[in-house]
Image (tube, rainbow, N blue to C red):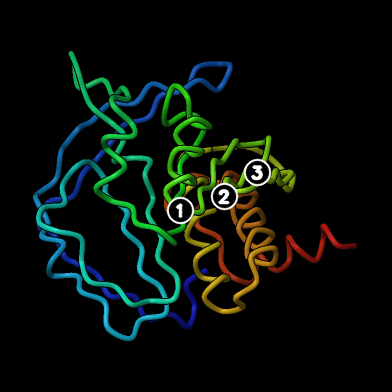
Amino acid sequence: MFDGLTVRELPAETACRYANRYDDRGNRTQLLLHRGEPLDLALAECHGEDACVIAPAYHEFTGRLPFCEAPVRAVLLQSALRATEGEHVVFHHDPLGQALPLVSPGAWVFLSVEDAADADGLARALAERGCHVFVTRAYNGATLFEAASERSFAAIPSDSVIDPTGAGDCFAAAFVVRLAESGDVEDAVRFALAAGSCAVETTGMSGIPSRDAIERRLAREAA
């Protein structure tokens, strides 16, 4: 997916780590293993980039939001909505309060239906503030919430489901990449759905699909 892209990163000595456990029905229990070290967002100023993505792993960002003039600005909310209790079991707390410091009008915002008790309600609240908000729904596709509309997109079928972890992140990253390239929302959604379809078919980082894999999946769907 990232072939040909230049990615500017903030390095960290220690990163946030989770463990995901799925029951026979696909319901997830998530444990926070390590919080990761704080990262100062002021170090991530954007100047001339095509896209800027803010994707906290677990409340590690400090300081103000970075200046960003990129044409595509995105926020992945999944981890920002998390809190922990007991034996580091993850739950969701005050979703709107956690989201508002990270978003701004015009931003593309991503979360999954698992990330809040009322994910659609959160999406509508953010859309009313000028954001474009995707709620991903695994094999049920995704919904785009905007101030004046809600649009649903059907999933692209996978050959198999081995590991669903990270599929929503792949969807978001693929959408941002393709929107920055084409400027076409519908095209970017299809590209993102194909990326999510590929991502669940293997485990771990190997699930991140290449651009060729995404384009093959799109060609198969179009046939």
Residue 215 seen in render: yes
Circle 1 SS class? loop
Up/down of 28 relative to 9, above or below: above
For mark 3, give the secondary structure. Answer: strand
Residue 129's place in the image compared with 125, above or below, is below
Q: Nearer the viewer, residue 8 or 49?
A: 49
Residue 184, x across and y down, in percent? 65, 71
Horizontally, is 125 left or right of 135 in the view? left
Which amino acid is tagged 2?
Glu
Q: Which residue is mark 2?
A: 146
**Mark positioned earlier in the residue sequence (3 or 1):** 1
Instruction: Provide the residue designation for mark 1.
Output: 131
In the picture, the quarter occupied by the C terminus is: bottom right
Label 3 to label 1, Cα distance in Å?
12 Å
Residue that label 3 marks: 150
Mark 3, other Cα within 10 Å: few <14 / some 14–19 / many ≥20: some
Residue under the point 47% across and 83% down: 4
- Comparing 19 with 221, the one in front is 221
Residue flagged by tag 1: what amino acid is it? Answer: Cys
Q: Are marks 2 and 3 in contact (CB under 8 Å)?
A: yes
**Horizontal side of residue 142 vs 222, given as left or right:** left
